[in-house]
Image (cartoon, grey):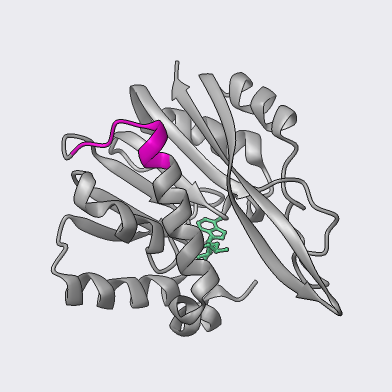
Amino acid sequence: MDFDAKAKEWDTDPVKRERATAVAAAMRNRLRLSPDLSALEYGCGTGLLSFALYRELGSITLTDSSTGMLAVLREKIEASGAHHLRPVRLDLVIDPLPAERYDLIYTLMTLHHVSDVERILRDFHTLLRPEGVLCIADLDREDGSFHSAGFDGHPGFEREELRSTLARAGFREIRFETCYVMRKPQGEEVREYPLFLAVAVRA
Ligand SMILES: C[S@@+](CC[C@H](N)C(=O)[O-])C[C@H]1O[C@@H](n2cnc3c(N)ncnc32)[C@H](O)[C@@H]1O
């Protein structure tokens, strides 16, 4: 998908803003957020989720493979003065693992774009400090209608399958909840696409 081309208009979509706010609320409910924690957001886009959380966290590294998304994010950081937010181009499918380690990693609507899920979960495990927490917010398994033709990622995830993959990657205390329901018009109908929040602790 061409995220560079979508970057400038990304934040004009109220659904994307509402989705990030809902995921932030679910994380706040589930975790003890604190300025002592250093965090990494993977697939941050324009940073909607981190902007909803930044007052409650310490340094945040916001990563994405799209330079267009990161350009919009840089402007937002400049305008907000939130200089503990650090944008970094990173694609763990092709780039080496960074050296830094984090207390918290979170990712919203990005895992379904990554082909080798097991490998990236192992990478997240390596990037977390012991007892660090991983939060994944993404689509529950859908019938393939969420994306348009030509999409080559995952049609959402079966929670129990993802739970097993997380466990194999070295995570424990894995919990799922529904954190948001996206609604998309499809012809005469409005289709619902629930999103889960999975929270897991690095063993
Ligand atoms: C659906 S968007 C979600 C963006 C943001 N998390 C949000 O919810 O507004 C998916 C994001 O993942 C990024 N992305 C896709 N594949 C990636 C990869 N392999 N590594 C890093 N980022 C990736 C895209 O550039 C895009 O910004």
Quadrant holding the N terminus? bottom right
Residue nearest the observer in this picture, 115 or 177? 177
Residue sitting at 70 percent across and 33 percent down?
Answer: 159
Residue 47, position as x, y percentages in the image: 37, 63
Residue 193 visible (yes or no):
yes
Residue sitting at 31 percent across and 60 percent down?
Answer: 51
Quadrant holding the C terminus? top left
Left or right relative to 190: residue 68: left
Residue 138, position as x, y percentages in the image: 60, 49
In magenta stretch: residue 30:
yes
Left or right relative to 125: residue 78: left
- Vertical side of 107 occupied by 33: above or below: above
In magenta stretch: residue 47:
no
Residue 198, position as x, y percentages in the image: 55, 35
- Vertical side of 203 occupied by 69: above or below: below
- Vertical side of 26 occupied by 114: above or below: below
Residue sitting at 37 percent across and 30 percent down?
Answer: 128
Indicate the quadrant where residue 151 lies: bottom right
Residue 90 visible (yes or no):
no
Indicate the quadrant where residue 110 lies: bottom right
Residue sitting at 68 percent across and 23 percent down?
Answer: 164
Residue 104, position as x, y percentages in the image: 35, 36
Residue nearest the observer in this picture, 97 or 191? 191
Q: Which residues are magenta?
A: 27-34
